[in-house]
Amino acid sequence: FDQVSFLQCFSLHPLQSNSTSKSITTRKDPTYISLLQSSIQNLRFLNTSSPSPQLIVTPVNPSQIQAAIVCSQKLGVHVRVRSGGHDYEGLSYVSQMPFIIIDLRNMRSVEVDVEKESAWVETGATLGELYYAISQKSKVLGFPAGSCPTVGVGGQVSGGGFGTIFRKYGLAADNVIDAKIVDVNGKVLDRKAMGEDLFWAIRGGGGASFGVIFAWKFVLVPVPPTVTVFEVGKTIEEDATMLLYKWQNVAHKLHEDLFLHAVTGVVTSSSSLANKTISISFGGLYLGKIEKLLPSIQESFPELGLTRESCTEMSWIQSVLYFAGFSQDGSPEVLLNRTQSSRSFFKAKSDYVMEPISQTALQGLWNKLIEDETSYLILTPYGGVMSQISDSATPFPHRGGNMYQIQYMVTWDSEEENNQKINWMRELYDYMAPYVSRFPRAAYMNYRDLDLGRNYVINTTYAQASVWGLKYFRGNFKRLVKVKTASDPANFFWNEQSFPVLSPGR
Ligand code: FDA
């Protein structure tokens, strides 16, 4: 890679402003390592053996993105695009080929238009920055994206994006009404210029296959001035298995104003033979006050035993703090912090459940989880508006028919544990095969998992890529491949799970 030529090409680009030097960080710069590492979430990829970029471009305006794309192609260097750096498999900052990173951290303005109930958001913003900006302008507007405030708007929204109000308002991607992208030709395109096919593809198909999305226009959604959060925790000894069994049948049918997820954890127990047990926390958000929530839950899920004492009323932005693990009474400014307070090594996978899992099978699942006390599951109920949106409205196909999604997670602290932990996760996934969706066994693209399949070479065939593509996108995979073929025929935006390009005539 000829770095000098790249720098020259970049600074001479006709659209370039004269702030080049600040926008490119090379390996020689003292800030290179901290810039590279600061938004890496999975410590598996924060080590000296992971391939690192030749340089990092941190554009301050769209023309610098255009210059980076044009010059990378001219000099034959590969590009990775990073917004929040939360990719589970590190695809936004690791590549086996010589590469540069375009990191959007300096393009993160959020312009909220309260009257029109919309916002233009640059993709380098985090969800926390987005939520904070909305809350500064209105107490009764919100946005239905994920719970973790450090996640980037770029990656999350292009892969779907769900959170505590998605049963009422759908995914983040469902609420995009315009976008701006730099395509493979270095052109800036908005919705009108890119056309409806590409606009469809980037709202759930992941942005990385198609170009650099640098802004989204969102519809903001109404939230009541008072919402209620609640939590009930039970261990297996306290009949949590029966409760979860019941939850499976109830949670996806609840009113769309009510979100009730279940999070398992391994805890020590004096009353269990193994000295360890599973606890399940049933936590939720209700878009309204306690007095309406209690009778409604009493009717639909009396076994939960929800009492007034387990409920707290607050504003929507306080609920954002609460679900992010902060005190709801603290300042919302913590949402502006772009770095996670704690990071770990992790491996995750996902599944979709369409039939209730029996209590016997759940018991087998607990036996497996108890083997690793850093493991946990997050079970997210679907239903509500998610079942009313058609499977092909966006590339995200997991709509009607899904009762809930499972995220499996295991974490650890040192590189030596990598193989053992990853193998354990694969065993857990094998155990669950009979109980979850099949043909294909579906998965959520934003919980990226390279075990599902990957492109080893640039010209992967349609059949080879279908192995992972049908799991993430089901019936939408073919259309995504066609959009990819039309928008990036030379497959410049390649990665281990980018869409293949069809050969001419197919
Ligand atoms: P990152 O920058 O790593 O990008 C991810 C992918 O998108 C890469 O392929 C990258 O190249 C591409 N990309 C990023 N920006 C782009 C751009 N501007 N243009 C084109 N391509 C771009 N999900 C969810 O739905 N709900 C949730 O509540 C959570 N919670 C959560 C918590 C934590 C701690 C983690 C680590 C992850 C989640 N997620 C989640 C998953 C999350 O949505 C997923 O990892 C996103 O892809 C992360 O987006 P980032 O921009 O942070 O990642």
Image (tube, grey):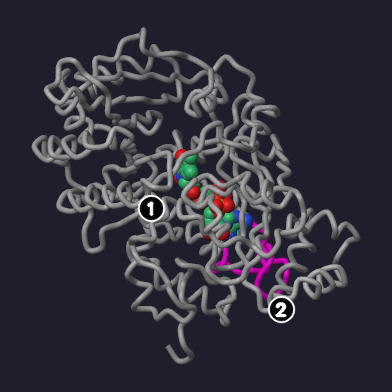
Q: Is residue 171 visible?
A: no
Residue 434 in the image: above or below residue 249:
below
What is the crowding at mark 1: few (fewer than 14 residues within 10 Å), some, or many (at least 20)?
Answer: many
Relative horizontal placement of residue 89, taking residue 225 as reference (left or right): left
Q: Residue at x 45, y 66 (%)?
A: 497
Spatial distance from mark 2 to mark 1, Cα to Cα?
A: 35 Å
Q: Residue at x 68, y 48 (%)?
A: 35
Q: Amino acid at mark 2?
A: Leu
Find residue 176 and report its horizontal and vertical position in percent.
Answer: 57, 51
Q: Quadrant of the C terminus?
A: bottom left
The residue where tag 1 is placed is 444
Q: Residue furthest top?
A: 309
Q: Which mark is residue 290?
A: none
Residue at disc 1, CB closer than 8 Å to ligand 1: yes
Find residue 373 and report its horizontal and vertical position in percent.
Answer: 29, 32
Q: Which residues are magenta?
A: 179-199
Q: Is residue 30 magenta?
A: no
Q: Is residue 193 magenta?
A: yes
Relative horizontal placement of residue 48, taking residue 474 as reference (left or right): right
Find residue 225 and report its horizontal and vertical position in percent.
Answer: 56, 20
Q: Quadrant of residue 51?
A: bottom right
Q: Residue furthest bottom?
A: 505
- Which residue is at the front of the view, 206 or 266? 266
What is the crowding at mark 2: few (fewer than 14 residues within 10 Å), some, or many (at least 20)?
Answer: some
Residue 51 in the image: above or below residue 364:
below
Which of disc 1 and disc 2 is earlier in sequence?
2
Discs 2, 1 touching: Cβ within 8 Å: no
Residue 157 in the image: above or below residue 331:
below
| Of labels 2 and 1, the one closer to you | 2
The residue where tag 2 is placed is 75
Q: Residue at x 73, y 41 (%)?
A: 111
